[in-house]
Image (spheres, helix red, strand yellow):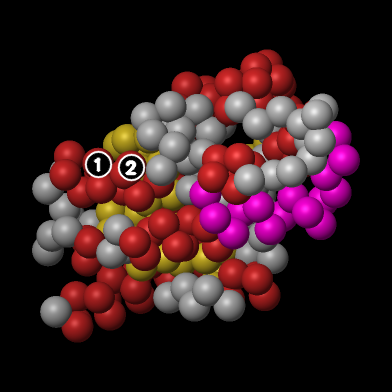
Amino acid sequence: MPRRFVLFDFDGVIADALPLAYDVARTMHPHMTREEYIPLWDENIYESTKKLNCGPDCRRSAEEFFAEYTPRRDEIQIVAGAKEMVQRLATDYTLCVISSSLSLDVMAFLERFEIAQHFADILGMDVHESKIERINTILARYDATQRDCVFVTDTVGDMREARKSGIDAIAVSWGFQPGERLAKESPVALVERPADLPAAVAVYFENAYARA
């Protein structure tokens, strides 16, 4: 059996990061409502924020965002059930994080909740803003094929970037974007509870290898 990889988005999937992310985003874009913020995740967040037209008090740089976000990262809690979800998946798969956050922030969180040992690799936005590039890095680093991987995410933008890398995506409905929005992007599965993700991953790989 080939080595199989579960590539995790981090914010929203493992970390309950939406409250802090939106709060800091509001300091960058003072007039932005929550209804305006959520659709930004329909594409790579760094690309979408560059297009915002929010006036002279708008700030767009990732450096400014993380200057406010990182000192507050301990406010973020783990998604209920995510620790057990990760522990179960780690028994059968190689887990990696591909996140819009900084790699060091992700590692600090995983260590705080005692699950860092379950992840083979963490590629944050400091590696590259594009998740396409980071997915391709994982494929090359581990000599993996697209069939050997599945991406777990809570945003339409991630699904689109995964697709451009030839990777299928499982969407989860407890994160940054609601399930009905994610479903329109046709993920291979839409999971509503962390406890149900391991089964969805198992079914995905069973079907993926059956098609080969």
Left or right placement of residue 46 versus residue 51 in this view: left
Identified by mark 1, the residue type is: Thr
Query: Residue 160 appears at what percent x and percent y?
Result: 45, 62
Give the residue at mark 1.
Answer: 137
Query: Residue 47 appears at what percent x and percent y?
Result: 54, 45
Q: Secondary structure at mark 1?
A: helix
Location of the C terminus (image quadrant): bottom left
Left or right placement of residue 11 versus residue 129 in this view: right
Identified by mark 2, the residue type is: Arg
Is 86 a magenta residue? Answer: no
Q: Which mark is residue 134?
A: 2
Is 37 a magenta residue? Answer: yes
Q: Eyeballing the image, is 116 above or below 99?
A: above
Could you tell me which residue is drawn at 32 percent across and 35 percent down?
121
Query: Residue 175 appears at what percent x and percent y?
Result: 65, 55
Task: Give the main secondary structure, helix, strand or loop, of the magenta stretch.
Answer: helix
Q: Secondary structure at mark 2?
A: helix
Q: Between 197 and 49, which is closer to the camera in this rendering?
A: 49
Q: Between 4 and 138, which is closer to the camera in this rendering?
A: 138
Range shown magenta: 30-44
Q: Which mark is residue 209?
A: none
Query: Residue 12 appears at what percent x and percent y?
Result: 62, 48
- Specify the quadrant of the image occupied by residue 26: top right
- Determine the CA span between mark 2 and mark 1: 5 Å
- Specify the quadrant of the image occupied by residue 190: bottom right
Q: Residues within 10 Å of mark 2 (few under 14, many from 20)?
A: many
